[in-house]
Amino acid sequence: MGRSGDLHDVAVVVGPGFSAFEFSVACEVFGIDRTDDGVPPFRFAVCTEHAGPVASRHGFSLTTEHRLDRLDEADLVIVTPPGLDFSAPGEQLTDRLRAAAGRGATVASFCSGAFTLAHTGLLDGRRATTHYRYAAELARRFPLVEVVPDVLYVEDGPLASSAGTSAGIDLSLHLVREHHGTAVATAIARRMVVPPHRDGGQAQYVDAPVRPCADESLAAALDWAVGNLHTEIDVAAWARAAAMSPRTFARRFRAETGVTPHRWLLERRVAAARLLLEEGDQGIDVVAARCGFGSAAMLRQHFLRLVGTTPTAYRRTFRGARSPVATRLLPTA
């Protein structure tokens, strides 16, 4: 796909049950004249399949001047989230989206709009993302799509997709940056009072899962491990504490939790680090020691891999995010 300023005409598609936030993101980034800030003008259009009011999911409707034939002129076509049933688009929209991608326009989805693109077949064999809550469903319904669940946005050829809600801003600014340069993207971001680029991916916004365990002997061993994250936990000793051989312990552990003991322990340590970073003010070395990582470098390595950002960046974003109930779960020193 071409670059260097070939993004000037933008069309956003709105259908029944549309989400106001994602729709307004497209309007805010591309539908406002900011030439006084050095931003090139965008020709912007809101398009619906039929004339007449289109109802949102929020209790209001809108009417638009343009129908789907307007997509034929656009350099960028944005698909907003469909209704909550993620139903397939009509034949006319399907054809228009395929034609737009075929002639080299960028076709982008915000949040669950990825389901619309997947229904058209445009995402087959390509990477795509959506809100983390819907990623597994997207992968289940469309096995030919390579779903990337832990990023803010993906661009693969003429297709682009973004994660939940505000990630539409990230994708939009990325496309502006790719076509018009960093200065233009930064000028738009400054006017919107948002960061021109966010570190990390969706993983940092997902609560760390607590994997259930119905086996009482294992449950007691897991509770013990959570209370001793700051110590070195030897899996063989852990198995003895559960009165099992290491082989039996590993087998029953995976059957109950879905992961290996090593993976479970790593997830718990990272989850504990997240709590400390959100509610505490200790240095990264102290956080690492309290969670059993031994060094700040080791904490950073595993934190970056599981959460998608660094401990320092995570603290900067989420300090004070936890409730007093969650704070009581902080690991002891």
Image (cartoon, rainbow, N blue to C red):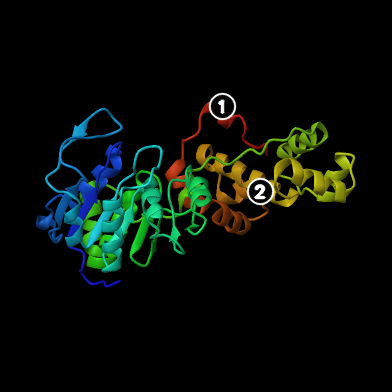
Q: Estimate the x, y position of residue 137 in percent, counting from the top left.
A: 50, 45
Task: Report the residue marked by disc 1.
Answer: 325
Helix, strand or loop at disc 2? helix
In this view, 51 is above or below 288? above
The circle on residue 187 is none
Residue 159 figure quarter: bottom left
Q: Name the residue rendered at 44%, 63% in the picture.
A: 126
Q: Estimate the x, y position of residue 214 in percent, counting from the top left.
A: 75, 32
Would you call the spot at circle 2 few (<14 residues within 10 Å), some (14-19), or many (20 or more)?
some
Q: Is residue 113 visible?
A: yes
Q: Is residue 173 visible?
A: no
* Residue closest to the far left: 36
Residue 326 figure quarter: top right
In this view, 133 is above or below 200? above
Disc 1 versus disc 2: distance between alpha carbons? Answer: 23 Å
Would you call the spot at circle 1 few (<14 residues within 10 Å), some (14-19), or many (20 or more)?
few
In the image shown, does 34 or 282 lie closer to the viewer? 34
In this view, 15 is above or below 158? above
Q: Estimate the x, y position of residue 116 in percent, counting from the top left.
A: 36, 50
Helix, strand or loop at disc 1? helix
> Is label 1 or label 2 in front?
1
Task: Report the residue marked by disc 2.
Answer: 289
Name the amino acid, label 2: Ala
In the image shown, does 90 or 232 lie closer to the viewer? 90
In the image shown, does 52 or 293 lie closer to the viewer? 52
* Residue closest to the far front: 91
